[in-house]
Amino acid sequence: MTSTDFVRPALEWLGQDPDPGTRAELEEILRREDHAELAERFGAKLEFGTAGLRGELGAGPNRMNRVTVMRAAAGLARVLGPGKHVVVGFDARHNSDVFAADTAAVLTGAGLRASVMESHWPTPVLAFAVRHLGADAGVMVTASHNPPRDNGYKVYWGDGAQIVPPIDAEISEAIDAVGRVDALPLGEGWTTLGYQDIVEPYLDAVTSLPIGEARELSIAYTPLHGVGGQVLSDAMVRAGFKAPVMAERQALPDPEFPTVSFPNPEEPGAMDLALELAASSGADLVLANDPDADRCAVGTPLPEGGYRMLTGDEVGGLLAEHVLKSTSGDGRLVATSIVSSSLLGKIAADRGVGYAETLTGFKWIMKAGPGLVFGYEEALGYSVGSDAGLPVHDKDGIGAALAVAGLAAQAKRDGRTLTDLLDDQARRHGLHATAQLSVRVDDLSLITDAMARLRAVPPAELAGRAVESAEDLAEGVAGLPPTDGLRYHLSGDARVVVRPSGTEPKLKCYLEIVIPVEDGPEGGVTAARARAVRDLDALKKDLAAVLGL
């Protein structure tokens, strides 16, 4: 198909697009006869998968817009069938509220019941609402921590967890069968869910988690221009903590995310304002949520002054110990993903509970098995449970923040810090040091080519460590479904996993080195941490050279 062949589909799109903004955008592209831009927008389409849809806002099937969203809603309606109930939530990104209303109109027009949240609330509130209301599915309009020009469409099933195969393929096939959206019947009779209807029950659930008794703690917090600020503050106060001091310039939802390059607490610079606030206020703990508040970042004071942000694996290890101390009974299970630290498996063995390793993503962690009381992934995602189970069947940055605050408050009461708790774990299980090498690209073929090179010629060694085994995760490993990724086990108890991101144009590499800590004074852990920094830096450098990106 030549670039000029995209004029006809563009004109067909114009004829059904209900949005004057994207219509004007496309009319200008046609007026300029910008065939390259037409080919980019109409030569491909956003594919609906287990992460739903996510992409840049704009006109055309390869963009997030009202036509794309209405088609997705129509496909979901066809799979569910008339009479089924869907809860719809949305964040504060550009057009999120519009996409939520379009979804409700299409669903009700197809004979389904829709309940739409009246305001932009966190993703975990939506995930909770699906089960709390006994709904058949849920939709969250969010692009999480993607750049400002992106938006997305995440689908949950009746168990309150994100969809997994084959449901995603069924919805995708149904979407492909949808005709023009201007021919879809649209309804108006959906229910609006207020704060008392769904946020209050959510807060009741997460503040009932085992948090401990200590509450004396000062917290510096940022919602990173997202929707977590009010709900997190309400949760903290309801649980008995003082309201966090909030980074003022990032306190209110703003879809432009003006103070950060990327609204992701893992990205360089994103936590600067929160750390400055912590230093000026003398905070005992630093907390952050990503824009839809399903992730939680944690910072702790250093003995020499200043603060250090913990890795997702470090927080995951601390929360695992906390949950297993706070729960009881046989059949408990903890789970994490193949790219997260191997520490959780050792904690589970030490506590005599079950352990499962899943593919990357909370949709898989929530399917780990019965008795799940804790799940986490290294990308700052945690689901914290109790003997009653998990209140949210997805990652929950609010519930995790409460649990971390309880841990930090108890440590403060004992004259200790979260760093001291991490040192205890290192002495008991060895120092599990992790790091990530992430490469963002404009051309996705660069990632495809890099993966092909690694498969064709796997490295024999990295940073002086022999590659003892190389596993192609696309072939299915250890009973896991196939996925695009490679895993290397290196000599000296080290591991590397390389995989393309499922939600961003990135190639992500996950590194872990386990260093034994000898019995003795504090210096044993300090020396191990210094060695880990050197070894991980060397591994990053070698891996970057091998990738050639």
Image (tube, rainbow, N blue to C red):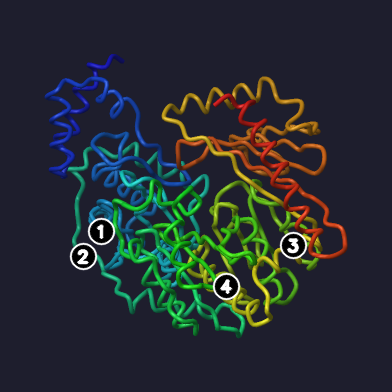
Report the Cα–Cα distance between label 3 and label 4.
21 Å
Report the Cα–Cα distance between label 2 and label 4.
39 Å
Q: Position of residue 534 (x, y in %)?
A: 71, 43
Residue type marked 3 = Gly
| Label disc, if present, on residue 90 of the rendered structure | none
Which element carries disc 2, helix, strand or loop?
loop
User: Circles 2 and 4: CB distance less than 8 Å?
Assistant: no
Residue position marked by numbered label 1 in the rendering: 108
Residue position marked by numbered label 2 in the rendering: 189
Which element carries disc 3, helix, strand or loop?
strand
Q: Position of residue 216 (x, y in %)?
A: 55, 83
Asked if residue 516 lies left or right of residue 337, the reply is right
User: Circles 1 and 2: CB distance less than 8 Å?
Assistant: yes
Asked if residue 268 lies left or right of residue 302, the reply is left
Report the Cα–Cα distance between label 1 and label 4.
39 Å
Label 3, residues with CA under 10 Å away: few <14, some 14-19, many ≥20: some
**If you read the primary sequence from the N terminus, does the residue marked by circle 2 or circle 4 appear first?**
2
Residue position marked by numbered label 3 in the rendering: 354
**Which of the 4 image quadrants contains residue 214?**
bottom right
Residue type marked 4 = Ala
Which element carries disc 4, helix, strand or loop?
helix
Report the Cα–Cα distance between label 1 and label 2.
7 Å
